[in-house]
């Protein structure tokens, strides 16, 4: 991932620039498109970063927006990693439904989605679904 000096578009959160992509795409296409721009699919690392990112998505996609995150368990079921293959320490799964807490999709759902609803909860979904996305760029 290339680093930028400033965040001209999108939103600056910490030392990252996040850019909302409104076009609906499958996970792999969204990831490839972020890579082509010099970034990766977004992956918040803290509660505050996740909250700010959910707020940004809500501003752009509305209260029921859902975007692909750069988090998946494609290689090993249940081991959620970022786009570099590193295990993610921060997760914000939606566990509000006690009968079916997230992640609940098993081998059929391997890609993480961030909801723009308050709380910015995550869910696991089929990577072949069409979703909006958010790219992440490092700021130096």
Image (cartoon, rainbow, N blue to C red):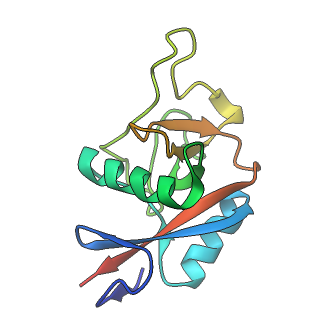
Nearer to me, 93 or 52: 52
Left or right for 66, reference 128: left
State which quadrant residue 24 falls in. bottom right
The image shows residue 27, relative to residue 19, as above or below, that is: above
Residue 130: horizontal and vertical position, in percent? 75, 53
The image shows residue 83, relative to residue 8, as above or below, that is: above
The image shows residue 40, relative to residue 102, as above or below, that is: below
Residue 40: horizontal and vertical position, in percent? 49, 70
Residue 21: horizontal and vertical position, in percent? 60, 69
Picture residue at 46% right of the left edge, 42% below the top = 80
Nearer to me, 64 or 41: 64
The image shows residue 122, relative to residue 87, as above or below, that is: above
Residue 43: horizontal and vertical position, in percent? 41, 57
Picture residue at 64% right of the left edge, 59% below the top = 132
Picture residue at 34% right of the left edge, 49% below the top = 50
State which quadrant residue 10 falls in. bottom left
Q: How many marks?
A: 0
Left or right for 94, reference 129: left
Q: Residue furthest bottom?
A: 5
Q: Quadrant of the N terminus?
A: bottom left
Q: Quadrant of the C terminus?
A: bottom left
Nearer to me, 137 or 80: 137
């Amino acid at each position: 991932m290339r680093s930028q000096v400033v965040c001209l578009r999108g939103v600056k959160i910490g030392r990252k620039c996040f850019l909302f992509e409104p076009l609906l795409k499958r996970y792999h296409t969204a990831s490839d498109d972020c890579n082509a721009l010099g970034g990766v699919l977004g992956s918040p690392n803290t509660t505050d970063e996740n909250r700010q990112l959910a707020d940004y998505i809500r501003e752009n996609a509305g209260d029921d927006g859902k975007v692909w995150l750069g988090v998946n368990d494609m290689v090993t079921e249940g081991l959620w990693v970022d786009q570099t293959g590193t295990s993610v320490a921060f997760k914000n799964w939606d566990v509000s439904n006690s009968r079916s807490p997230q992640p609940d999709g098993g081998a059929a759902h391997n890609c993480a989605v961030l909801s723009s609803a308050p709380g910015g909860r995550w869910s696991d979904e089929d990577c072949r679904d069409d979703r909006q996305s958010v790219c992440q760029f490092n700021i130096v």
